[in-house]
Image (spheres, rainbow, N blue to C red):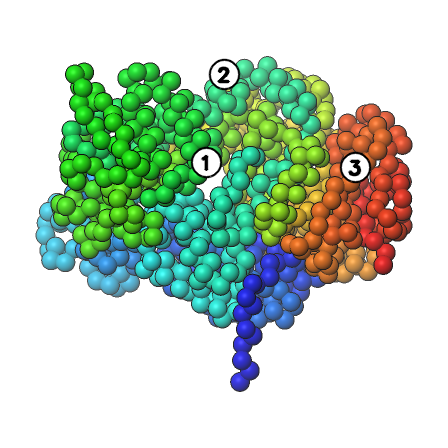
Amino acid sequence: MTAPPATPATPAAPSATYRVQVQPGFTFADTAAWVPYLAALGVTHLHLSPVLEAVPGSTHGYDVVDHSRVRTELGGEEGLRELSRRAREHGLGLVLDIVPNHMAVPAPEHLNQALWAVLRDGRESPYAAWFDIDWAALNGRVLLPVLGEPLPDVMDTLAVVEDEKAGGRVLRYYDHRFPLRRGTEDLPLPELLDAQHYRLSFWRAARTDLNYRRFFTISDLIAVRVERPEVFEATHATVLRLLREGVAEGLRVDHPDGLADPGGYLRRLAEAAGGRWTVVEKILRRDEPLPPGWACAGTTGYDALDRIDGLFTDPAGVEQLADTYRAFTGVPDDEGGRWEPTVRRAACQVVARDLAAEVSRLARTALRACPQPVFYTQELVEEGLRELLVRFPVYRTYVRPGESPSAADAELLAEAAREAAATGGERLAPVVELLHDLAAGRTRTRTPDSGGAGTDARCEDGSERSDGSERSDSSDGSSGSSGSSGSDGSDSSDSSDSSDSSDSSDSSDSSDGSMGSDGADFLVRFPQVASALHAKSVEDAAFYRYTPLLPLCEVGRDPARPATTPEEFHAYCADVLRTRPATGTALSTHDTKRGADVRLRLAVLTEMPDAWRTWMAGREERGAALGSAPAPDRHTAWTVFQTAVGLGFCHSGRLVPAALKHVREAGLRTSWTESDEAYEKAVADFAEQGPCGPQVYDVAEFAQALEPYATANSLGAALVHLTMPGVPDVYQGTEFPVATLVDPDNRGPLSEPEPGTARSGVDRVLARLLDGAEPDGADEAKLRLTALALRLRRARPDWYGPGAGYSPLTAEGPAAAHCLAFVRGGGSVTVATRLSRRLEDAGGWRGTALPLPAGRWHDVIGGGAYEGRVPLADLLSAWPVALLTREE
């Protein structure tokens, strides 16, 4: 028997990855059939969406129910191994997407056996430590907000039945199955319900009463306490085994910001995975570095997306569009008119409403972390928390129990606290100061003053309260500690009162030996809530309210910083090469709200804002003349028409769902939980009968006017992405121009294009282009560019690998700002045209030239050989991009 190859000490990073959304409609076997084409395209690894057992029918796989098995609907472990074998035959490896933060609360519930055991046996279950449950809040019960109506109104739909799949007698509610506590099976229904370790409730109760941590505000995704060693081992055993056995070679980590200790988790993962290439879904602000010490290659690439999109965005045009947008829509500043007021109002609404349960739990923990006597009410502490949380400009801090905050975290917390205290005045300032200290890992003693508000006397960092006691919060009738995790993954719940502790079997104090368990609990949970708030208020609310230019409202982008200069881009690339040269880069993902080609088409509007203003001014009159359904409001009209132009030609089956998702996420007139059916019908009617109705040809005509500049943006962004520092991830199908909208529109299965289209027979088209045929249209042009860049990247790691150099090239002449150029590894030069419509309006290149490094250079895209100072009008005469290689 041949011994398996030894695992390299430092596994190599991919040259490039190709993201595939595996799902029941596109299995491992389907993916294997595409392997020869993808290998010819030039990638080195297939990047698969989650492959572990998920909720049946799930098209994304992030709702895991069983970490021990590869998903049966995809082909099971044997199917995955066969895909791996097929990939290896063609020189490709696999990268797996893993979900450490949460699991599904499925229906039927027995699909998640770990959770099933907890619901059956309560906090005594060996799986109780798996999930982040505040047992004290409901006196040892778990709230299950699954009922369509309040419990008294659904009693006749509940019944005890035999269910062989669930293992015996269960409580049935439609598709749901709930386990029964031993010995309660024959009780009358009201008594049976009261005797369980869970409490069934109306789904709306999740907002205020939920006592388990969830993924953002999604109650059917329950948080997993992966910081505990035994939970980590159980939930990662299968994936780690697949890595050890060579089935896969790398990892993508979903949402690390939800974890108790992201840095600690990544260190443990890197050690267990043997240092294999790993990237994390971390969304960074422009001036925010990846936390130091994180054991990973870098991010999944939203920071690169931001810089690349910014290169093709004119900041002056953004300002003009914003002025036109405000005049056209008339929306108030804090409901979409201006970015900063909009995002602040959204944060205030989300923290007060959608995250009310999480804030209440934090407040109870904060009160328990204080010594007796405490004179702050639960309500006052919650108010202080809201004021502090809404002032976080980033996802979260990373303070660990027993450690001082980093300089960046300390500054962030201090600034947020100053703003919150100034807003709240004297009444709130002491509470904010207390919360700031807890969030920074400091505990305090308190003595009452004559006013009864309490006078604070700061202890040394990490000191324990003087009496060692817990404070019971009587506002909800509960008491005691909810438990938390120490920095080493051990449980830090205080068991001074066994009825109050989170887990009596894990009652050790926090790992640093000095900070009280409730202080550590707060320190862990505060940034988790901050992370959820940022995601929900920015990405899932404000991005749908503020819409002067839709591409600015994208994951990883900041509408306040819409553009990137070439100098800023070069500085970013130099930093990437210095700090994390194997980080991921991306232009489209399964989570982008619009695919790159839609965004880059709409970016052209920043170069012709007057044309957009004139076109939009005529929409209402034109619609009325054609008998179109009117828009319910001008904000919707602006957003839906801009989306339709981004698509290029309106498809009602795609635009209508996207428009409805937009207004629901915005939450201004309707929402997912408080729907206004009449308003939503008006939105759907308008989208179908306006942009996709009589005005469909108007939309197509305007979009066609953008086409040459959109193509220049698309090709330029693709080439920059594929040749800049980092590891590019090509999202499925985006080697062609793809006009996709927000999920689920962008998460369909990878499929062969329809016969007779320009993309049919992609393997044959690719082979023809690689043989030297000229591309026929924009579809083939992007495919050829992608393949040439990927294949060159794969063949020349000395030019593009983590150790390869990066040097800016600066054009000379009146149009120099329209050229982005750089040298990689001394052997290749990337050249891309920026803001091509503005360039055209100014009269073209007008003698602007690019001085090339010494040697003779060949353009693998446009052909021709060049040396010395090359006029850009010559170099870019056929295509708006060039990829030059030095002749050896």
Residue 803 point in image, percent of width and height? 66, 55
Q: Which residue is mark 2?
A: 332
Q: Which residue is mark 3?
A: 810
Dot 1 falls on a residue whose secondary structure is helix
Of callouts 1 and 3, the N-terminal one = 1
Q: Is residue 205 visible?
A: no
Q: Residue at x 22, y 51 (%)?
A: 508
Residue 654 point in image, percent of width and height? 57, 39
- Give the Cα distance between marks 1 and 3: 36 Å
Residue 215 point in image, percent of width and height? 38, 43
Residue 376 point in image, percent of width and height? 22, 25
Dot 3 falls on a residue whose secondary structure is loop
- Give the Cα distance between marks 2 and 1: 37 Å
Left or right relative to 200: residue 306 = right
Mark 1 is surrounded, within 10 Å at the Cα level, by few (under 14), some (14 to 19) or many (20 or more) other residues, namely few
User: 69 or 432: which is nearer to us?
Assistant: 432
Q: Which residue is mark 1?
A: 407
Looking at the figure, which quarter contains the C terminus? bottom right
Q: Amino acid at mark 1?
A: Ala
Q: Residue at x 29, y 39 (%)?
A: 462
Q: Amino acid at mark 2?
A: Pro
Mark 2 is surrounded, within 10 Å at the Cα level, by few (under 14), some (14 to 19) or many (20 or more) other residues, namely few
Q: Which one is closest to the eye, mark 2 or mark 1?
A: 1
Of callouts 3 and 2, the N-terminal one = 2
Q: Residue at x 18, y 16 (%)?
A: 451
Q: Contact, CB < 8 Å: mark 1 with mark 3?
A: no
Q: Amino acid at mark 3?
A: Thr
Left or right relative to 883: residue 335 = left
Of callouts 2 and 1, the N-terminal one = 2
Q: Residue at x 76, y 47 (%)?
A: 823
Dot 2 falls on a residue whose secondary structure is loop
- Give the Cα distance between marks 3 and 2: 43 Å
